[in-house]
Image (cartoon, helix red, strand yellow):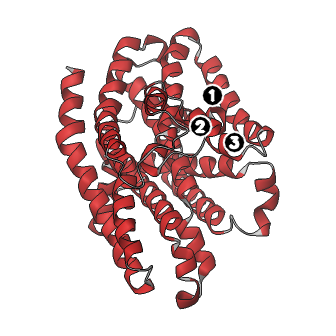
Amino acid sequence: MLANNKRFEILDFLKGISIILIVLTHIDVTMQLVDLYREPLGFNYWLKVLYRSGYEGLRVFFVISGFIITYTTLKRWKSLDKINVRKFFRYRFARVAPALLFIVIVLSLLHSFKIQGHVLPDELSFFRTLFAIFTFHVNCLESESLYLPGGWGVLWSLSVEEVFYLLFPLLCLKVRNKKYFISILILVFILGPITRYRLDGFSVWQAKSYLSNMDSIALGCLTAFLTNGLNIGKKKLYSLVFFGVSSLILLLCFKHSDSLSFIRKYFLYESLISISMAIILITSVRLELGFRIILYPIVWFGKICYEVYLSHMIILVFVVDHYRSNGYENIYALYYLITIFVLSGLVGFLIERFISIPLNKRLRG
């Protein structure tokens, strides 16, 4: 087993990169930064890559999430078939529920007071939305009706994760043979691109359905098994981490080019992003990679990524409303972008410090 908590610094760093990409994408969707900077900067393609890689950032989250769940399960109970289901759900609830409940209360108040950008569409019942949140099918709700306003809409990914983790401990007990368990995870990973291909034409459900996204979580689980049993020299590990980082960067940089058209046609792009991330995880965790102080802001962002993810759209809507009142002036766009990141980090930290951590400890007993 992995024994040194220092190794988790790489996870925080990768989560930090991911949440930055997600926030940038949501900022771009709202403020149209790529279009604004088309003429002044003259490198629109690379801005498009930077500002519109949030979906890939979410994929990275899913892989890391599956890795952490499997790793901690093996660390606590030594073997998956010895998992304590009651404790597993208790720990999961303690981690997820406090921040989620706080955000839902805030969103409910904003909706009740008819604050622009947070009001649910007339076609959608407020209580129907709450039911979807707490029964983990916000993704289904969005596929059936309109897109939810930003602060509500980001909760779809939590629905995918939590359904996977409702099944995970039960599967651990039911499938006691490790080889069979790994085979099921491989099957879930294979079903990912098949599901996306079969759902072509149903854009919302294709992007947000359970099986379309669970392949990345399943690969994260597999990565924990591989990391635990990997026994190769440092030179090969460095070569692998270089390969993983290079492939991830190339996939991101050329995702809009014709060179990846075949991969995108059969919806293998998401799978390759996940595989690249898995390679980075396996090797960097084994190498116990640390980071220089200049990169610690990213690591810090990664530590509060869950709270930032849940809250950033609320902040973004308020800041962008003020931005729009200034007439979308190019010269101010960067200042507003920085403001969104600073406020998102501050609010995420406060939620973690005063809600997530203390309630997590209390709920765990």
Q: Nearer the viewer, residue 321 or 315?
A: 321
In the image, which disc is placed on residue 31?
none
Residue neighbourhood size for the residue with mark 3, other residues' Cα within 10 Å, grouped as few (<14), some (14–19), many (≥20)? some
| Mark 2: secondary structure | helix
Horizontal side of residue 37 vs 102, given as left or right:
right
Using the rendered image of the protein, determine whether residue 328 is visible from the camera's viewpoint.
yes
User: Distance between the Cα atoms at labels 3 and 1?
Assistant: 20 Å
Which is in the foreground here, disc 3 or disc 1?
Answer: 3
The location of residue 83, given as percent across then percent down, is: 42, 14
Q: Which residue is mark 3?
A: 206
The amino acid pointed to by label 2 is Leu
Q: Which residue was labeled with disc 2?
A: 219
Dot 3 amino acid type: Gln
Residue bearing mark 1 = 185
Residue drawn 53% across the image and 27% down it: 164
Going from N to C along the chain, the mark reached first, 2 or 1, is 1
Q: Quadrant of the N terminus?
A: top left
Quadrant placement of the C terminus: top left
- Measured along the vertical axis of the image, is residue 196 above or below residue 1? below
Measured in 3D between alpha carbons, the distance from the residue under mark 2 to the one under mark 3, in whole angstroms, is 19 Å
- Image coordinates for residue 293, horizontal then vertical, percent: 27, 66
Q: Are marks 3 and 1 in contact (CB under 8 Å)?
A: no
Q: Residues within 10 Å of mark 1 (few under 14, many from 20)?
A: many
